[in-house]
């Protein structure tokens, strides 16, 4: 008979074994865990600007640091440039609210960590350039007139003042809703060199000053004296006028702003400016612009002149009155980039060509011209669609393109006579004949026949008859 002790004994065995295993594991653990050392916050460092960068205006700074810390950027005098919080990825970025002192500068990082501790970060040496003026025109260092307007852009509602070297206002203006301004002096500026600063008062508060800027005030703008407004000129006109001695000067095409020629005003205040490229046919506006140095669209502009460029097409080959072959090459001059049609007799198209930038054209007669006399006329179609007709040239087409040889005139009578001992001038009323293929008129020449001299023409025959009658 089985007893019930066995399961109970088994349970005791299992419990004992488990306890033994647990005791063995506990014995393997150290008596006490060592405490972990604290991790120092990340030192803030620059990503931008980089060492040696040249900065104009408020600097943009970016870098790395301890997540959650507040980074302050200062310049070498200790003035704050900007602050930023480091994000979860350890990055920060901020932009300075004001321009830094012009010249070499050192930027420094300092971080206030989440535990309120402070970490001094890296530094970077940069050069601060003079900030760009708040106006786009005129440029610093340029020539201006006594009533020169200072123009540019900014934030709507900000107030701009232009101040002279004594810090007295030259003009004041509020930037309009389009973000632009034009500040005109309330009184004419004094002639000669001047220095100004620009003071911007923000609508949100705070004042920002830029400058100083230097200009030279001149008595008046440059002029164009020739060609005068309304003149009709060729496609390579020469401009003359007046300006400030020693100043650079451009002649500007009014529509495109392209300088068609550049020169320097002579010591006597006069200039001559010759374009390097031919002008398009048509009516266009031009004006002079004068600069202290170099060139650009910020110089002192003069008044516009409106001129009309006119070019009449002309055929230079074949020459008028010359000879040619039927499939002749026809060359000539016309307004640049115009279309030239060659007409025979004023109606029949011979060929068409496009003139190049030098005003030259060339085309080949097709079909070939027939033998004989042709009158070729060039007709130019300008880019605006207007037509200009040139002078016609008379061309005689021959088989080989050369003048035919003179033909021999046949004797008037087979009767031979002796040479006249007194070769006087032909009597008045003597017959005149067209010489073959020469285009000239004159007395028929003497012709040698059978070793004797035969005088051709009516006058010589009459002389022979009179001498025969006197002999009988």
Image: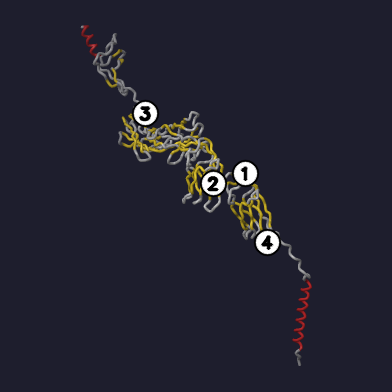
For disc 3, the marked residue is: 319
CA distance separating discs 4 and 2: 42 Å
CA distance separating discs 1 and 4: 37 Å
Q: Is residue 260 visible?
A: no
Q: Which mark is residue 199?
A: 2
* Label 4 vs 3, first from the N-terminus: 4
CA distance separating discs 4 and 3: 99 Å
CA distance separating discs 3 and 2: 72 Å
Q: Which mark is residue 115?
A: 4
Q: Nearer the viewer, residue 287 or 393?
A: 287
User: Where is residue 6, by image quadrant?
Assistant: bottom right
Label 1 Cα crowd, 10 Å radius (few <14 / some 14-19 / many 20+): few
Label 4 Cα crowd, 10 Å radius (few <14 / some 14-19 / many 20+): few
* Label 3 vs 2, first from the N-terminus: 2
Whether residue 193 is situated above or below residue 198 in the rendered picture: above
Residue 376: give x, y in percent of width and height.
33, 32
Mark 3 and mark 4 in contact (Cβ < 8 Å)? Answer: no
Q: Nearer the viewer, mark 1 or mark 3?
A: 1
* Label 2 vs 1, first from the N-terminus: 1
Q: Nearer the viewer, residue 273 or 219?
A: 219
| Element carrying mark 3 | loop
* Label 4 vs 2, first from the N-terminus: 4
């Amino acid at each position: 008979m089985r007893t019930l002790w066995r399961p109970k004994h088994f349970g005791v065995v299992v419990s004992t074994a488990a306890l033994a295993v647990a005791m063995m594991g506990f014995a393997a653990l150290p008596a006490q865990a060592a405490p972990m050392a604290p991790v120092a916050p990340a030192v803030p460092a620059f990503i931008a600007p980089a060492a040696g960068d040249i900065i104009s205006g408020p600097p943009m700074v970016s870098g790395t640091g301890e997540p959650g810390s507040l980074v302050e950027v200062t310049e070498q005098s200790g003035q704050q440039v900007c602050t930023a919080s480091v994000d979860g990825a350890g990055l920060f970025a901020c932009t300075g609210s004001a321009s830094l002192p012009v010249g070499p500068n050192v930027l420094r990082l300092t971080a206030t960590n989440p535990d309120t501790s402070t970490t001094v970060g890296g530094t970077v040496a940069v050069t601060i350039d003079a900030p760009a003026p708040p106006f786009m025109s005129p440029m610093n260092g340029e020539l201006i007139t006594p009533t020169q307007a200072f123009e540019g852009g900014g934030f709507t509602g900000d107030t701009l003042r232009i101040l002279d070297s004594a810090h007295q206002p030259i003009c004041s203006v509020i930037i309009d809703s389009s973000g632009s301004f034009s500040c005109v002096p309330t009184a004419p500026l004094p002639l000669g060199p001047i220095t100004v600063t620009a003071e911007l008062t923000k609508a949100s508060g705070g004042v920002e000053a830029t400058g100083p800027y230097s200009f030279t005030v001149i008595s008046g703008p440059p002029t164009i004296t020739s060609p005068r407004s309304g003149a009709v000129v060729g496609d390579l006109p020469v401009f003359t006028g007046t300006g400030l001695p020693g100043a650079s000067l451009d002649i500007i095409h009014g529509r495109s702003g392209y300088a068609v020629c550049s020169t320097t005003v002579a010591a006597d205040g006069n200039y001559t400016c010759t374009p390097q490229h031919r002008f398009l046919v048509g009516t266009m506006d031009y004006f002079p612009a004068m600069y202290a140095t170099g060139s650009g669209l910020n110089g002192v502009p003069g008044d516009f002149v409106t001129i009309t460029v006119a070019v009449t097409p002309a055929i230079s080959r074949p020459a008028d009155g010359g000879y040619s072959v039927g499939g002749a090459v026809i060359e000539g001059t016309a307004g640049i980039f115009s279309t030239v049609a060659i007409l025979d007799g004023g109606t029949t198209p011979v060929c068409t060509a496009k003139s190049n930038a030098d005003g030259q054209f060339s085309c080949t007669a097709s079909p070939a011209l027939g033998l004989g006399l042709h009158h070729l006329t060039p007709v130019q179609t300008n880019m605006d669609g207007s037509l200009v007709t040139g002078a016609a040239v008379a061309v005689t087409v021959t088989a080989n393109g050369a003048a035919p040889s003179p033909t021999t005139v046949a004797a008037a009578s087979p009767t031979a006579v002796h040479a006249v001992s007194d070769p006087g001038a032909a009597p008045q009323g003597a017959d005149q004949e067209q010489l073959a293929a020469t285009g000239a008129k004159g007395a028929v020449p003497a012709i040698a026949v059978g070793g004797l001299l035969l005088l051709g023409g009516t006058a010589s025959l009459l002389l022979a008859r009179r001498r025969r009658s006197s002999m009988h």
